[in-house]
Amino acid sequence: MAEKETKAQRVERIKKEKDGLDVIKDIHRYAQTGEEVDPEDIDRFKWYGMYTQNKNLQGEDDNTLYFMLRVKLIGGELTLPQLKVMAEICEKHARGTADFTTRQDLQFHFIKVADLPEVFRLLETVGLSSIFAAGDVPRNVVSCPVNGIDHEEIADVTHIVENLNAFFKGNREFSNLPRKYKVGVNGCSKNCMHHEMQDVSFNAVKKENGEIEFAVSVGGGLASNRRVAEHIGYVTEEQIIPLTQEITRIYRDHGLREKRTKARLGHLIEFWGLEKFVDTLKENINFEIKAPKEIEYTHSKYREHFGIHESKIEGSSFIGCALNSGHIGLDGLNNLISIFEKYDAKALKATVTQNIVITDVPSQNAKDMADELEKVAISPFPSNFKARIQACTGLDFCKFAISETKGVAKNLVEHLETKFPEFSERVTISVNGCPNSCAHPHIVDIGLMGTKTRDEEGVMTEGFELLVGGFLEGVNSQFNKKTGIKFPLNKVNETIENLVIDYQNSEFSNFRDFLLTKAK
């Protein structure tokens, strides 16, 4: 009897037998004929940004195969015409669902195969795509949402981000990587794209003579690849794409494909050692990587752009807003469209913390626009609890989730705002529905990790484990520590409320130091 394929063997065979990019022909065929989708093609649908979703919200008599569809926003940007198309897709094809992600994408739920050709057509009319938004490929290249308009930025890297995304888009040379592959480019003085957790990243640094060079870091990640990216040196802007190309080739050809949980770039670097990785890289490029010299980075708690700010563009301002775990939905999209049109704004950019920045508001309209945004819960001046809360897709839609998330996050914020209206410290929170790290629970003050636990009656139920004390700050970064504290879903608000009360009654001068006393 033949041995059963491992998960890794199955995925590698599927990719080898048919490139994920080639499934587009099958998508159109399935949509036209209505035939059942081959399970192996379902895996390939990821190359066009799709995952099958949990059936929790489906009626018992509804056997439809629904997908989550992730749309790549280049540089995180959505223009007003693109917003209108997103709202149309949201209303007609996604049952009003829409959420911003931690990779500056927008994703929908309840997408049916029969609707995909029309959804893809709508996206194409405004220059959007879902290609490589998921799968074992280079994902959306993340960056600062205020590139080119922030007076405090080190460099405007907009064109670098656009060129890298264009280089990767549908590139068959890199359509079969060992796992997902994440690149970031930063010109922001606050390093708001979180280079520490990218597979490959470039941070702009201004030299004494005014020239810009880029610090290169490799091998960062969360979940099974929980490690801080390692700094390997400096390159010029012109060297970014060729260097990225060579790093990606090394990863493609040498990545550890035998086990899915050990297949990220960071795993290869750990297996080889950083020295061998860098030596291999240098052997295959025709330019020099200047010697490494680590720099200081802003603490991740302060990597944000909320409020009204004068832009570099004369007469224009940008407004950073909190959404509460990325949720926007049809009402939110329509609210943005009407407010944009009323105050003559033309675009927004998503952040890596599931929030948005409206990038081009006429300065004379900024105050009134901010006031109106606040009325529809899009908050330019968010509370210390709402500003930096993140949540993954959760039990409603994700097949891996143990606990619900988005509603939990919303209720938790509202509860804490009511109980502690004067709380003066920024608190970063993540609500994660399973042991994976989609909502980045390991790099926040309070991480809620989905788990099974017992309720007051001793019955097993969905709940969370409390993690504490995580943050990013270059080589000083720290991942969250387990507390061993677990509680059911209906005790989330009470548990975190009591945590804040205990802190206020303690002798600690800051919340983070207090939280670390809870660590095991």
Image (spheres, grey):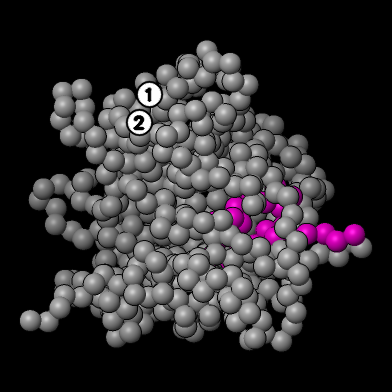
Mark 1, residue position: 495
Please report the bounds of the magenta region as a residue range: 184-208
* Residue name at image x 58 percent, y 75 percent: 277
User: Which quadrant is home to the N terminus?
Assistant: bottom left
Q: Which of the numbered marks, if any, corresponds to residue 345?
A: none
In this picture, residue 208 sits left or right of residue 347? right
Residue positioned most to the right? 209
Secondary-structure class at tag 2: strand
Residue positioned most to the top? 505
* Residue name at image x 51 percent, y 45 percent: 479
Assess whether mark 1 and mark 2 are in contact (beta carbons under 8 angstroms): yes
- Height in image: 516 above or below 332? above
Residue 9 visible, this angle: yes
* Residue name at image x 78 percent, y 55 percent: 154
Which quadrant of the view contains residue 299? top right
* Residue name at image x 25 percent, y 58 percent: 66
Instruction: Return the x and y of residue 18 as percentages of the image width and height.
Output: 32, 84
Nearer to us in this view, 402 or 221: 221
In this picture, residue 231 sits left or right of residue 500? right
Mark 2, residue position: 485
Check if residue 188 falls in the magenta segment. yes
Nearer to us in this view, 36 or 304: 304
In this picture, residue 498 sits left or right of residue 238? left
Find the distance from the CA under tag 2 to the CA under tag 1. Answer: 10 Å
Amino acid type, mark 2: Ile
Residue positioned most to the left? 1
